[in-house]
Image (spheres, grey):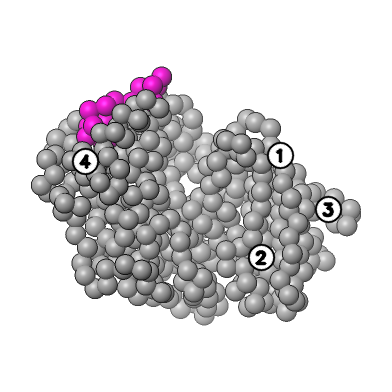
Amino acid sequence: MTRLLAGAIAAVLVAFAAAERPRAEVGKPGVTPVPCPQQEWQLGDAAFDALPSAKAFSGKYDGGLYRIEIPDNWNGDLVLFAHGFVPNAGPNGSMLRVGVHRFREHVVKDGFAWAASSYRCNGYVPGQALLDTIALIDLFKQSNGGRSAGRVYLTGESMGGHVTLLGMQEFPTTFAGGLAMCPAGPELFDYFAAMSAAAEVVTGVQFHADTVPQDVAKMTEALGKPPEYTEKGRQLASIEIQMSGGPRPFAMEGLAGRLIANMSTSQAALLGSTTPSNRAVDTAHLTYAIGDGLGLSAETLNQKARRKTADPQMRSANGPYEEVVPFDGRIQRPLMTMHGTGDLYVPIFLERSLKRAVSAAGNDKLLTQRIYRIGAHCQFSQPEMAKAFDDLVAWVKSGTKPQGDDVDGDLSNAGQTFTSPLRPNDPGGRTVVTSSKQ
């Protein structure tokens, strides 16, 4: 076991050296990650129990934890799972943890091995997370007696969905296919910053670097609590719905827990923060929209909203960090995405941005997007995830692109095809509208 672990760590180091490209090759495939937050990290327990007729492998690599599970009837393929955002603040912010695959039982039952990593730091770190996830390929080989996987599938949720999209773009031939569930992306932070600026206009309260908590408290009081919004609360709610994809099933339900959070997540970008992600934020290109009859016009909002222009040295294909640059759509393998209509944490408008990028690169044949009628972030059912993964595998093997949804279309009654089961209080066949009374 000691030799195995030593060999695995050595393999990880080699993988990182291969994956991290030098700055001289900016613009070429590969990832230079935004550095991890500077703090001391503690390692949790990676051990876990294997499912029946499978074997569990776990341990530490240089900087993090890993878990691998190989079924006795292994079919020769490997599924990598990238987890979502874990805050690097609070009482457990420095603890690194590794979980299990969300639809692990389905994957193992069908003969796939799977692997997951803690990453070597918490925070919003898709670049580092991608390198740590790729390093699992060699860790798997070491755990599997030196036998490599035939096909490797990349999957992930939320920030892990960002990892998946980034991996399919920057390592375009490493993976047989990708499944990005509720995927985030760089333009999410444009949206958050834009909602901060909209909240300033709506409430009349402006963010200041030295009074942010007090500013948020004043805004919250002015907006009211869902569903009992004040007039100003209804205005900001409409702006968030319109800007995140338009009226759609469960959008107001999903907004209930995100109205304040969305407008107080990236205000630092408006206030001059110099982190790579905040330097890359751009709201200058966004056009605000709001429903009728709410006492605020889109024209006034667009005139008064504070704007943030991206640092061109950061938000560029030739910039230092690929993870803060919008996707270029240059994928070479099948990619499937899943997104919920009521996800206001990582809204569905990001699917439209992805589709534009993939279409501009001439790769429409490699992208299938599916919509689900759910009222929260990443709350897909097991049947929904299993079918999406199975359809991706069949696509990889047969070359026949599976059915998807039109993310650019009217979303007011979207998600009928792939939602299974319909959730409680689903509006059914009724078209969802936004009015001044919502």
- Residue, disc 3: 5
Question: Which residue is at a point 35% across and 66% down the rendered structure image?
Answer: 373
Q: Is residue 289 left or right of residue 57?
A: left
Q: Earlier in the sequence, mark 4 or mark 1?
A: 1
Report x, y in % for residue 429: 24, 73
Using a 10 Å C-alpha cutoff, classify the residue at mark 3 as few (fewer than 14 neighbours), some (14 to 19) or many (20 or more).
Answer: some
Residue 168 higher or lower than 271, as above or below: below
- For marks 1 and 2, give the CA distance: 24 Å
Find residue 230 and name its label.
4
- For marks 4 and 2, give the CA distance: 48 Å
- Residue, disc 1: 42
- For marks 2 and 3, give the CA distance: 18 Å
Q: Is residue 68 left or right of residue 219?
A: right
Given the current orientation, which residue lies at the most extreme top position? 210
Q: Earlier in the sequence, mark 2 or mark 3?
A: 3
The kind of secondary structure element at disc 2 is strand
- Residue, disc 2: 114
Q: Are marks 4 and 3 in contact (CB under 8 Å)?
A: no
Q: Which residues are magenta?
A: 198-212
- Asked whether residue 208 is drawn in magenta, I would say yes
Image-quadrant location for residue 329: bottom left
Residue type at mark 1?
Answer: Gln
Residue type at mark 2?
Answer: Trp
